[in-house]
Structure formats: structure tokens, C-alpha cells
Image (cartoon, rainbow, N blue to C red):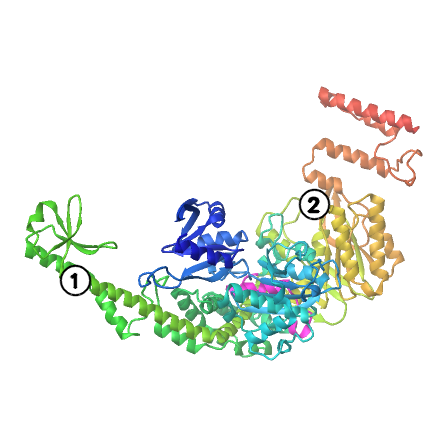
Amino acid sequence: MTPIRRQYLDIKRRYPHAIVFFRLGDFYETFDDDAKLVARELEITLTSKPMGKGERVPLAGVPYHALDGYLSRLIAKGYKVAICEQMSDPATTKGIVDRDVVRVVTPGTVVEGNLLDERANNYLVAIVPPSSRRRGANGASPWADANATVGLAYADVSTGEFAAGELSASQLAAELARLRPAELLLPQDIDAPEGVDAALTPLDRDWLLIEVAEAALRDHFRVASSEAFGLGGQPSAVAAAGALLQYLRENQRSSLAHVTALAAYRPEGFLLLDAATRRNLELFAGGRSGKREHSLLGVLDLTRTSMGARLLARRVGQPLVDRRAIEARLDQVQYFFESALRRGRAQELLAQSPDIERLVGRVVLGVASPRDLVGLRRGLELAPALRDVASEDGAPDAVRELAARLRPCDEVVAAIATAIADDPGATLEAGNIVRQAFNQELDSLRGISSDTKRYVAELETSERERTGIRSLRVGYNRVFGYYIEVSKPNVHLVPDDYERRQTLVGGERYVTGQLKEYESRILTARDRVAEIEEQVFRQVCAQVASASGQALALAAAVAELDVAVALAEAASRYGYARPELHDGDELSIRDGRHPVVERVLADGTPAAGTPNAFVPNDTTLSNAEAQIAIITGPNMAGKSTYLRQVALIVLMAQTGSYVPASSARIGLVDRVFTRVGAQDDLASGQSTFLVEMLETANILHNATPRSLVVLDEIGRGTSTYDGLAIARAVVEYLHNRPECAAKTLFATHYHELVALAQLLPRVRNENVAVAEEDGRVVFLHKIVAGGADRSYGIHVAELAGLPKPVVDRARDVLAALENGHVASTRRPSGVPSEQLSLLPARPQLLDDLASLDIDAMTPLEALTKLYEMKERARLSADEGTD
């Protein structure tokens, strides 16, 4: 076995769960099973290499300068990659070069800009059930116990964000849906909760011991106890936070320098949105395509910075329940909403800002490029101008407080501006990093290097004159260095002091003592230039890293300013109004609109049967008088849109945004629940109806009088009578149980439910208005008082393009059903006598026969119709109907 092979195997044994990228010269090589995997996933050639006597191992490698591109493809597939670098200079090292893993790149610890979505956080999440904090836990899944306490910690290594807290197992799914982790850390032998789409990594159980986790937090943050973070009495949160820190220390130690604070996360401070509600309200992805632009975030995100975009996404996914905090956000929005000039100036400045958060992170983590430093400097230089925009006369307290946090980072700016050139090379190897006149030795050495062309030209001229060889040429290549090239016919003219270096087909290459001396001087200068530039660059990075807290604080303020400006721009552009918030339970919206649908109608081609402009609607709900609104009306008339728009307006208001309405008075809610749409989960054996019932059960178990509940077509996945019974029981439960008497919008096609308004005092009937003109149905999309008695489903089927014979037949069946034809008395036990028959009785059969247009029918259609009528007649005769 070769020394290289032994070295590689020693390193691989330490990182068995990662692909080891082993640096050999200008390549990162992989071996054995890693090589087979990399060749398959990256679609590169699999070769082999002798690594000892009689041993040849699989090999696949990628150029070191193209690492990021290949790395991104592996990380996107959920793999972990250990980057093993050469730790000593091969040129000066005797024997084998020292190598070691400098970091393990995993989906949750990526920091490279081209591997990240710049407008979204990249979270590493650790979750710890209580049973896993102690050694010897049996590993049974605790997620089924809704009341179990779960520790949760999450970090974005690229920005330095780090938080931890405790929540119930019933809240966990909602939090994971909010965070959308790239990587999830779990105790060994514990299965992940259902619905998690993330790379899974097992945690060492020793890391979860409370004393070990406490020690990790104390050592890293230099505090006496985890109580310093507000985590006193939360052992599961401490275990999760400590385990996450130790995972970073094990796999990417440099990232710990970027984690400078731990925030205590308390779910009760936010409006909780479960995964179904996030999906149903299309907060982050909308439509069948799942596009971001068709979501609420896509409409509101007019931010100009990546930092602002990430903050807005966090706010949309985590609205507040504290009125004072929400009002402060609304004050910031109003400040920029009231002045288009102020807003435009802020947008102009923000558009010039780079991603300060992630640039600081790259510097701290030691992976920044020279251009990253220049970008960071230019971003920090914007602070005074941004502060001026937020400090104009009349600014409210929330804006003045924001302006105070826009503190210039003068020392960091000066350190970069003094030392680093304005347009440096993209990498250290590319050079031109240090500014002229910063380092006297460097300027002198650069002078030597810059004189190379002049020296070569002068040497070439003098040697031609000395030798009389007019075709003599002085050149350079990386293998042989500088040389003098003479063609074959002139070799006899070469002086005695020329030393042959290389023979060519058409000539010879020589060196002289003078040329060798100059080459040594040039190469020494170049090496020294590279050494000094790297040294200066590292020194500047260290200065920036030491002030990273100040720079990150400025970045947070810039992001907050960006969000306020973006929401003000959305409010101005789309005609939104500032909501009036209160601590009561009344919800009153005037001229409310769906923020996404109205943009689709305004910007694109409306769907068939819809108007060219969005039709606004009013909403009034209150726990005391109008707690539940039963909404009936035609298919495709806008019931579902109306339900969602009310929920979105409430959510937007508690996010701190203006809302799409002429006015909105909103009593703060603690949760928004939605049960909308037909979905199944075949992988886990759950039918559409079962999924519907599971989501409904979750609502009924967790809703409170301060919640907002949106229900669309409860009970439609089963038989008519079963569905109607379930729908009525749900309405009665929400109305009659004080502990879950939430404000509710209940859309249904069960027209029988309108009778509940006569029985239950806090139930109101509403319907979507329809006009019929000359036999044509027109959807008005307007919510009016009262119940509907028709659904116009056949009309919608016709709009959808069902074949005309199907539509005509459906109308015939509907007419028969509405005329009251019933099934025979011979029916199965338990079936109500009034159940309607889908086969009309004999008189209808005769009517159908008389109405046939035989001349217009094909022979096949006529034969089919005859067989159909024969079967209907036989069934009628068997049942004894007239």
C-alpha cells in the first residue's frame, strides 16, 4: 500500500458518512465506492489508479478550480462532502504532503454563494424529544404524543442566525413547515416526523446529555448558564442547541465563529400556521405549477436586497400576535408609503447593497474572495445615506429606532478601502489584490514583474545583434521557463555561452547564465508577491471578522428597512390600506380582495367566466353575533377565493403589512386554520377523505375563540348523507363548544345547512350572487346575505368543455331529480326512502324517446341509445314503477 493510500484510508475512516474530496495537486480525487458514486452522480469518467503492489482502486476526480459547480450538484442531492486539503507546500515538503479535512459541506452547512438561494434562508435544524436526552433511551418515536415536549434549535450558518426553544409535538410539524430545513439532525434510532423533506443526519446520543449540551453552550458563548439565553427550565431546548453546536464543531469548526448569539424561540409569540394552512393559502408557492410568483410572498416581495427578501419570507411565515410590535412595523411602512420621493431614494440605495449578512459570513468562515471584501465595503458605505433617509422630520419612533441601528462601520470600511484594490482578481491566485502604495516591498516586486516584457524585448534585440541571428526569439513556458529559440539553419551561429535546454523539430532552445539569473529573480518576485498579497488579504479578513457583530447588526437594520420600503411600495402600487388592529374579536373588512388573484387578473389573461377586474367583498365576523358564516353558491363563482382572501388579509395585517381592502378592522387572532382542497397521501395510505378528516380533526382539537377557521366543502369525499351529517356536526361543534368557538367561514354545497341559521344564534348565511340572462349564467363574484339553492355545476362542466351529450344528459338527470322521482320501495336496509334515483321512471323514458332527433344520430349513437333505453325500461319494470 502506498503512503498516499494509507493517508486517504485514515481520513476516510474518520468521515465514513461523507464523500471525501482528497486534494492531489490540481484535482480533488475520490476513491473506491466514493469514486463510483461521484462518477454516477456527476456523470464523469470512472478510472482507476495503482495504489500499491497488485492493488488498483476506482478513481474519479474534478479540477480544484471547478469545485463549487460539482459540489452544488452533490449537495442538492443530499450528499455530504468532506473537503480534504493539502496542509503543507508540496514544493518544500520532504516525503508525503500533510493533508486534513478542513470542513464537511452538508446541505445545512453550505456557505458558498452559488450553492444557496440568495432570497431564502438555509436552515440546519436539530430536534430532540425528551426521551432522547438521557443515555439508553429506547428510540421509540415520540411524535405521536401531541403533548410531548420537543426541543428545537435551528441555525443558518451563512448568516449566523441561531435560535432554540421548546414546543409541543403537535406544533412541531408547523415549525418544520415554516423553517423548511435543508438538513435535519435527529437522535440516533429516532425516525423523522412525517412530511419532512430534508437530508437526515443522526446525532451522537452523548451530545444530547444535558450536562454535555450545557457545557457546549457555556464554552462557546462564555456564559455561566443557558439561563443567560432565556432557556432556563427548558432542558430539551438546551439539548437541541448544544447538539447543533457540537455538530458544527465536528464538521465545520470555522462556522462557529459566525454564531455569536442564541435567541430563545417561543412559539406563543407568533401566529401559528400548520403545514396544511401554509399550503392552502399558497404563502410561498402557488397554483398547480408551484411558482413563487403566484404566491403571497411573490406578490409582496418587492425588496431590493437578498437580506430583505429573507426577512420578508420569515415574517410571512411567522406573523406576530403582539399588537404593539405589529403597530411598530406598520408605522415603518406608513413612513415610506406617505412619500414616493422618500421611498424612491431608499430603493435606489438599497438596490446597490450586496448581501452583507452572507458576505460577512464568508469572511468569518474563511472562504471569502477578494471581490467579496470589496462588495462588503461598498455595502457598508451605504449606511450613512440610508440613515439619512430614515431620519427625516416627522419620522415615528419605530423609524427613528431603525435609523439608530444603521450605524456606519467606519473601521471595517477603512481597513478594506486602504488595503484592497477596487477591482481585484476573482481569486487569490489571480492577483492584483492589494492596493498600490499600501506595501512598499510589494510595489517594488511588482515593478520587477511588470518590467518582464521590456526586459524580454531588450534581450531579444541585443542577442540578435550579438549573434547575427535575425529569427532568434526569447520565449517562456511553464515547464522550461525562459528560453532563447534558434531555428535549425542558424544553429551553427549559436555562441559558446548558450546552453542547450530543449530540441525541437525545427530548431533548438537555449538558456544563458544571464537569462537563468533573471528567471530566478522574476519567479522569486512572483512568489513573494503572491505571498504578500495573501498575507495582507488574510489580515484584512481577520480585521473584518473581529468586527463582524457590528456589520451583522447593520445588515439586520438594512434588511428591516428594505422590508418596510417593499411593503410600502406594494401598498402604493396595489392600493392597499393600513389595517386597524385591536384586542377584541371583531373582524370587519370592507372591499377586501385576494392579493394574488387580483394580480393575476390585472397582469394576465383571466380564466373563462371571470371578470377582467377583481370584485371586492365585505366581511364581518365576531364571536358574539356572527361567529360562523355559511357560504353557499355556484361552483367557480368565487367561494374559495373569498375564504382565502379573508385569511390572507388577517395574516398580512399581523405580518405588519398593509392589506388589500379599502378598510380593515382586525381583532388579533392566535391561529389561522384552513381546510381547503382535495388532496390525498397515497404513500402513507391516506385517501382524500381521510386527509380531509385528519385536517378537520386537527382544527377542532386546537382552535380557540381567538382563532380564524376557514373550511371549504367539508364532507364532500363521502356519500351525500354521510357528508351532510359530518358538515352539520362540525358547524354545531364550533358553535356550541365555548373552548373552540372560533370565527369561521364555512363554504358548502350542502344547501340544507342554511337552515342552521334558524337554529344557531351566531350562524349567518351568505351566498355568491348569480345572474341569469337569456338562459346564460353570469357569476357576479359578489357575497350577499342569504343562502343559495343551486350550484350550477352543469354550467361549470359546460365551461370546462365536457362533450355536449354528457352535458345534455346531465341536465336531463338533474331535471328528473328535481321533479322528485324516487327509487323503488325495494331498497337495501338502512337506505332512506327519500333517496333520489339516478334512473328516471317510465314517463320520463317516454319523454326522452319523443325528444330524440333520429335524423341527426349516427347508427352507432342510435344503437347505443336503444340499448340504454331498453335497460332503463327493464329496471323500471322490475321495480314496479309507473
Residue range (magenta): 301-326
Q: Amino acid at mark 1?
A: Tyr
- Does 124 sit left or right of 435 as displayed? right
Q: Is residue 392 visible?
A: no
Q: Which residue has dot 1 on it?
A: 455
Give the structural element (helix, strand or loop) at label 1: helix
Label 1 crowd bin: few (<14), some (14–19), many (20+), radius 10 Å: some
Dominant SS type (magenta) = helix
* Residue 301, picture quadrant: bottom right
Give how far across and how far down residue 849 sits, in percent. Answer: 82, 25
Choose the circle earlier in sequence order: 1 or 2.
Answer: 1
In front of the other: 158 or 405 = 158
Q: Amino acid at mark 2?
A: Leu
Give how far across and how far down residue 373 sits, in percent. Answer: 41, 68
- Does 824 sit left or right of 530 as displayed? right
Label 2 crowd bin: few (<14), some (14–19), many (20+), radius 10 Å: few
In front of the other: 642 or 502 = 502
Q: Alpha-carbon distance for marks 1 and 2?
A: 76 Å
Give how far across and how far down residue 85 sits, in percent. Answer: 42, 60
In front of the other: 15 or 254 = 15
* Residue 425 within the segment the image draws in magenta: no
Q: Which mark is residue 682?
A: 2
- Does 407 sit left or right of 824 as displayed? left
Q: Quadrant of the C terminus?
A: top right
* Residue 855, picture quadrant: top right
* Residue 227, picture quadrant: bottom right
Q: Is residue 650 visible?
A: yes
